[in-house]
Amino acid sequence: MELKKKIEVSRKKVQKFVKKPENKKYLVLAVVLTAVFVIYKKYGNGKKAASGTGTNNGSTGTTTFPDNSANADGALGSYKKVVAGREYSYSRTPELELEFNEDGTISDITPGLSFDGISNRIGNKRIYYMLGYSVFQNANNSYNQFRNVFLPDGIYTIRQFVCDENVVPNLAAFKQKLTGWNNGVNMTNSRLSEVFLAIKTLNATGNSVVPRWLKVSRHLVFPSVVPQKDWAAYNKFFCIVYQNQGSSAEDYQKFGINTDLDYNVQAAQPKTWNTVRKGDPSIQDNNWYYQQGRSWIEKSGVSKRFVLTDQYPEDAQNTDPDIDTKMYHFYKGALDRISEVHGPTNKKNTGLYGSYGIDDFSKLIVADHLKFDRQTFEQSLTSHVHKVYDPASSSWAGDASYYATGAINVRNVNHSFYMYNNIEMIPYRIIYVNERIKVGTKTYQGQDRESNILGFGWAKAQSLVTPFGIGIEYASTGEIIPFPGGEIKSVQNLEIPMPWEENFTCGFWCTLIFSGLGMWNAPGSRFGKDASKLHWWTDQQVQWKKNGGNWEPYVSGQNGAPVNDSSGLMHRLWAPPTDAAYAGSDAVWKIRDRIQVLEHVSYTSSKGNFTAVPGTSGLHLNGFGSLNKNLFVIKDAYDGQKGVALRGSGQGGKVLIYYNGFLSPHEYEDNVIMDGVNLGRVYGRQTVIRTI
């Protein structure tokens, strides 16, 4: 009998023994033994890497296994440690080094690190940290050295910034300058190291809905673990381009996904999406765009579930002053063709979602309105809900082009989540954008022409700092990737992976409140799964270090180095942000019949109380009931640095949803009580769900 079977037999014998009344005194011993059996069963024999070796780091019970084979929990090209019952799946960088401590905490042990009373430093450089897109600091806004930090179960991107002291002398300056503009934190004065980390324990800590299957890997994990689903009945979408090699579009569509339309397939492709581009700045007339719209919807088989987006305005490169009007004709052509086949069709019942970024660029959406003064914020949802705001002059101008061109009649709204180094408050932002679009489209010119909203993001963080290319994203120190026989050091000089906890939050809240999320990438993007090979691009900086050797320039197949091949492991971690976004959407699927109505609710907690003030028709979010004017709850929560507290209801029952973006992920509040239900301890920036 193999060892695991012997352990299971022994465990059952202990449980049977202690059930006898005369043996109750051995209960504590039985509990301890059972825990040992469970831990061994989960983390013991059979979890080694393909090479059959693990490296003990010198701490009792701590073993490192490169996750570079499918039998290592399904992850590829990452690392794993188990310390005192906590399992860490993580990436490594050439600079930032972490220690997973025996008490369940984490510390930065980067060589040369010291503390001078102001901040950590390495030589003459100052060190600051972010977790995802939130500044890592103490509850009183003071500097935290990242020593012995406890993080609950979940996913994190630990981001270490090494900054010039004369530019970023203290934490206050870091927070002020972190976006990179105007001699801020950018590649001219700083560099960035990022560790992707997933934590799970036998007895989960925290209330997060982040699933336990998420792990750091260079291929998509979700297709092997999530249930099949179909969002059609709920008029929601999740769109991706990335796939694992060897899979088909149908393999992903069964998970409720719209996959990238394949130009080489002549048959109808109804469960797909496409971001159409022209590829040149040539100027075409209205009819050309109208016919293009008809043509693209035809490629889908004239499907109302085909998601059509575009980048025509970007291709125009400011050479066509009438491009907004022409985009009306493009989507009118698509909607007309749908109506010819399916009968008169409301654009709400289609996947027509417009040009990526255009609704933000044209100021139909200004997410920063949350940060504006109270009067400007309220105007953006009331008297000026259809207008464009000019921050330079602090004044309102004419109707947004979405209304003025008639686009409101032929397509829905596209909100960009192309993010760069910033402090992101995604749920607050989504709720505000929802209010502005729903109120605006339900009242324009006295007519109800309600539009849906699609979030539009991707797996990469983009530098938007001008002059172009100086954002901190271009000063990444890169990644270390384990391979049989050695390690690869890959330094990406283009877009780096998005912090995956932000993509999880985006996937959840876009699916909950918007109509879903599209995750763009170049057509045909695929993740290889051959852990003996590397997939890299020749404009990257890549080095190889054979076990026991030194770093040397990478040459495919030389000195034991992996061969460069598209079937190999991707040189950057773009799979985890994609996995995380899907996981967020999947979490909404579990409560899909409890969210037909969403309402703000009041709550109390150890951090203080919050009272939700109703609008003219109550506390329900617009789009989830009748028109509800003067609903400013999200501004109250934002200004008061409080959490977002929602109650959902539907034919499946009720659900409570909570998120506090003003607490760092290592901070928490206790006794969060909503609707008389105590959610217990809730950590910062965790989405919490409780069905009732």
Image (spheres, rainbow, N blue to C red):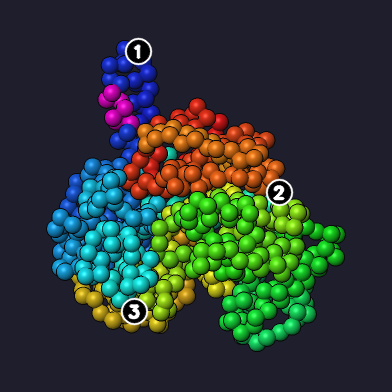
Q: Secondary structure at mark 1?
A: helix
Q: Where, quadrant-wise, is the C terminus in this rendering?
A: top right
Between circles 3 and 1, the one closer to the viewer is 3
Residue located beneath label 2 in the image = 233
Residue at 23% from the left image edge and 60% from the top image edge: 170
Main SS of the magenta segment?
helix
Residue located beneath label 1 in the image = 21
Q: Where, quadrant-wise, is the N terminus in this rendering?
A: top left
Coordinates of residue 478 in the picture (x, y in percent): 33, 70
Q: Secondary structure at mark 3?
A: strand
Q: Quadrant of residue 308?
A: bottom right
Coordinates of residue 653 in the picture (x, y in percent): 62, 33
Mark toward the start of the polypeptide (3 vs 1): 1
Residue located beneath label 3 in the image = 541
Q: Quadrant of residue 591?
A: top right
For the residue marked with disc 2, what is the amino acid? Ala
Residue 21 to residue 207: above or below = above
Viewer-proximal residue among 598 and 540: 598
The span shown in magenta is: 28-34
- Can residue 33 be seen in this snapshot? yes
Residue 282 to residue 463: above or below = below
For the residues labelled 3 and 1, say whether their Cβ atoms are less than 8 Å apart. no
How far is the residue under mark 2 from the one under mark 1? 54 Å
How far is the residue under mark 3 from the one under mark 1? 67 Å
Mark toward the start of the polypeptide (2 vs 3): 2
